[in-house]
Image: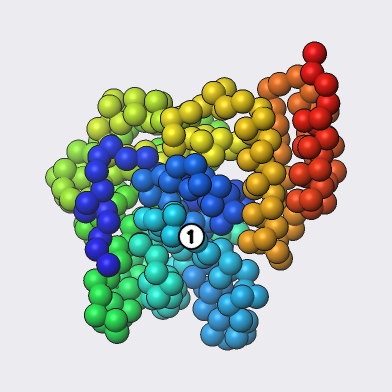
Amino acid sequence: MMDFWASLKKPFFVLAPMADVTDAAFRVLIASIKTPDVTWTEFVSADGLYHTREMKKIPDDENPLMRDLQYSEAERPIVAQLFSSKPEMMEYAAELVAKLGFDGVDINMGCPDKSIERQGCGAAMIKTPDKAVEVIEAARRGVAKHAAATGTVPIPISVKTRIGYNKESIDEWIPVLLRTNLPALTVHLRTRKEMSKVVAHWELMPRIVALRDEIAPNTKIIGNGDATDLADAQKKIDESGCDGVMLGRGIFGNPWLFTGRTNADVPIEEKLEALATLAHSFQALRPAKSFHIFKKHIKAFVSNFDGAADLRAILMECEDAGQIEETIANYRALPRA
């Protein structure tokens, strides 16, 4: 398997990993419209994969973490995002991801969730740069083991992080990662302390690009934070010099994002049809996942039109995909003024 990053044309636009949003069901819908240049899975615990598969021996078809690693061929190139602060666990999970046929592994070093940080993972890794490097090298060992066993080329290891922990520390933190010669580095342009409460610091991206040019010229730099649509993402690339942009929040209610359409461009009938399709996919692909999780999509898809609030309230009471589809059909049958 070739390193797809090396041949990826610039500029490019990729799908952010978002827990309980960009799951297999939503990604199938997105790919059916237009596949991003690169797709990320939701992030998955490397430790959890080891314990559920090796220790508890939970069958893969019953293992919720393995379901998080479902993907379709239409999503390629697709990267599995993992997190762990334990090199041995990362090595195990990276080898597993390679066996599953993913195009790459991405290591989350930016998540600000306290439960993740308590494990020394996510944004907490910014505070332990030596450990971060160990985890990257462990992932490389894992994919190399699979490559050696199959006579293939190891899949690439990338990283997603932030510009600092309590304060901006680009000059200290980013070079640590660049010196590992990553094929791609995604930088969320906020500190961990800032969460998403401030405007992303895109004015700092040229410094990151300059560090890349000096330390690791072949590493592709991906900016993340506040890009609303493809036009906005292109503007950020033009102004900052990064190679690509990762889009996250812009995908809410708009699986057409990577076609260049904005939410305002999509007729409500098309949105409602997509919502019904998504409900059925969610139910089929995530049978053990609470249907309540699906309902975050209702608010995103059903808004900004006359009667949206009333329809949304009814949809929020639905308990399965069949009820979602029936409610939408009843709405469509109503006479229009």
Does residue 254 appear in the picture of this structure?
A: yes
Is 206 placed left or right of 34 in the picture?
left
Is 218 placed left or right of 221 in the picture?
left
Q: Quadrant of residue 88?
A: bottom left
Q: Residue at left 61%, top 75%?
A: 61
25 shown above or below 236: below
Does residue 23 appear in the picture of this structure?
A: no
The residue closer to the viewer here, 187 or 234, is 234
Q: Amino acid at mark 1?
A: Ser
Is 319 placed left or right of 304 in the picture?
right
Is 212 placed left or right of 113 in the picture?
left
Expressed as whole percent of the image width and height from the top left, the position of residue 227 reads 44, 31
Image quarter where the N terminus lies is bottom left
The residue closer to the viewer here, 326 or 236, is 326
Q: Residue at left 45%, top 42%?
A: 34
The residue closer to the viewer here, 86 or 4, is 4
Expressed as whole percent of the image width and height from the top left, the position of residue 177 reads 29, 55
Instruction: Give the colour scheme shown.
Output: rainbow
Q: Quadrant of residue 36?
A: top left
